[in-house]
Image: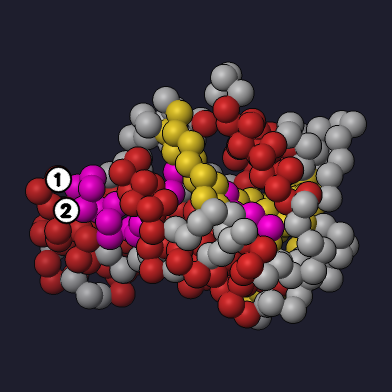
Amino acid sequence: MTNFFHLIAVYLLAVPWLAGCASFDEWQRAKIYRPTPIEPAAWPAALAKYPGITVQTLGVAEGEQIQVMGFPAKAGESSKVKVLYLHGTLRHVLQNSAKIEGITRNGMDVLAPDYRGWGASSPRLPDEASIHADAWATWLSLQNRDEDTRWVIYGHSMGSAVAVHLAARSYLSLHDMHAQFCAVVLESAFTSFPDVARSVSGPLSPLAAAVTTQKMASIDLIDEVPGPIWMLHGSHDATIPMALGKKLFEAAPSPKYWLDLPKDHSDMQTDTTGAYDAVWQQVKTRCEQAPVKAPTKAFFRQ
């Protein structure tokens, strides 16, 4: 996401008469989200590369649907702890298989939706509201699944903001439903899109921040996420400055845990020191101790 806020500022300066117009908003959304679709004819061949994958089609709006993919834990491993993975901009779920493998190798199944506009989900130019709606529809679909399952909400990059929004909304509205989450994991996270703009756009940063129509403001909701929260960030991240991840971490309620590694934006799962895998093992162990029914704030903060 490094350069699109700079592009927004340059674009506004070059054609100021477009400021506030629908075309400018659409241009922003296209540059920010850059969704990667899969043509229907190519969908079966794309799935065939991932043995064992399951696919569920969910209706999310009249005539529109999303594809939710399930990835099994590595052979011989099974856990009642499962992970809802919310991806970032650009790449669809299958293009994020390396990140998913970083979880399944640690013995947890992964469920991963493609928001509308990505993969084989319904085509559209996404916006903040549609992305949150798709994540919420996926979450609601989990409410009637096995009551013994413990769910981890995990978001990477933009998906971290989706995860914070989902976790806050779920905690505030679904206290009596069994599929409450037992942990939140945020990787390459940030405070808000405008803050990213201020950090990466140089002298044009105030303008880029001011005209950014998509907010993804995790900083406004993080205190509503009861935790435990694990936050991971690459110290060499050239897309999201680690300082923004740290700022979000400082605003998060306890219990919370931080890990930074000398990695870039999307490659923390390639860590060979064992630290990345250790985080997922900690999450798994913590969640295996979680109660079956919706946890209380007292449990989360003990």
Residue 82, disc? none
Q: Residue at x 74, y 31 (%)?
A: 105
Q: In this rendering, would 249 be left or right of 299? A: left
User: Magenta residues?
Assistant: 182-201
Of 59 and 271, the residue lying toward us: 271
- CB within 8 Å, label 1 to label 2: yes
Name the image quarter holding residue 8: bottom left
Q: Is residue 187 magenta?
A: yes
SS at badge 2: helix
Q: Residue at x 58, y 19 (%)?
A: 272
Mark 1 sits on what residue?
A: 202
Taking the image as drawn, is residue 116 in sight? no
The three-letter code of the residue at mark 2 reads: Ser
SS at badge 1: helix
Q: Residue at x 31, y 44 (%)?
A: 243
- Indicate the position of residue 19 as horizontal and vertical percent values: 18, 71
Name the image quarter holding residue 265: top left
Q: In this rendering, would 209 be left or right of 172? A: left
Q: In this rendering, would 253 be left or right of 206? A: right
- Indicate the position of residue 277 as horizontal and vertical percent values: 64, 31
Q: How many marks?
A: 2
Label 1 packing within 10 angstroms: few (<14), some (14-19), many (20+): few
Of 270 and 295, the residue lying toward us: 295
- Indicate the position of residue 26 as horizontal and vertical percent values: 35, 66
Residue 205, disc? 2
Q: Is residue 82 magenta?
A: no
The three-letter code of the residue at mark 1 reads: Gly
Q: Residue furthest front?
A: 302
- Indicate the position of residue 158 as horizontal and vertical percent values: 46, 53
